[in-house]
Image: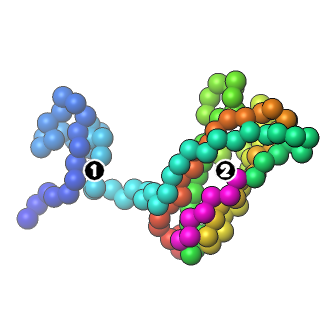
Amino acid sequence: MGDFGIKISQPGFDIITTGDENLLLTSKYNAFKVAQTAVVDWSIVGPSGGVDKTITHNLGYKPGFMFFFEVDGVDGRIIADSYSSVSGVSTFSNMYDTYLEISINGSPGDSGSLRYFIFADIIE
């Protein structure tokens, strides 16, 4: 039967003859399957110095996840893990069977955005 699957090559490369290094997408390899993603804006108001974001996923199990966050006025995007910090703003996250909770701590007036990815595959 031979070579089958999904391939998308970079502009200027023949999809039939090019190597994997010139592909934008190939089904030859396993990849993360994203169940849910979005951008969430956040702002710290009041003297508490923190804000909690709860993101419902209703998958019924604790999926893998990752998120990036930005602090307004600070160059760069931070890949966050369970605890991350940049420019005086820190994040702490927990995944549950039906939701992801992200706590953001900093100073009143701090704001920014975060993009999260919740993966569909069950971690075994």
What percent of the width, then of the height, locates residue 45? 82, 39
Q: Is residue 102 left or right of residue 19?
A: right
Out of 11 and 95, give the one closest to the viewer.
95
- Callout 2: SS: loop
Q: State yes or no: residue 49 in magenta.
A: no
The stretch drawn in magenta includes residue 58:
yes
Judging from the image, the colouring scheme is: rainbow
Q: Residue at x 12, y 43 (%)?
A: 16
The residue under label 1 is 26
Q: Which residue is mark 2?
A: 81
Query: Label 1 crowding class (10 Å Cα cut-off): few <14, some 14-19, many 20+?
Result: some
**Which residues fall within the magenta stretch?**
53-59
State the separation of the CA atoms marked 1 and 2. Answer: 28 Å
Q: Element at badge 1?
A: strand
Which quadrant of the figure has residue 101?
bottom right
Picture coordinates of residue 100, whole percent (x, y): 65, 61
Give the amino acid type for the residue marked by disc 1 in the picture.
Thr
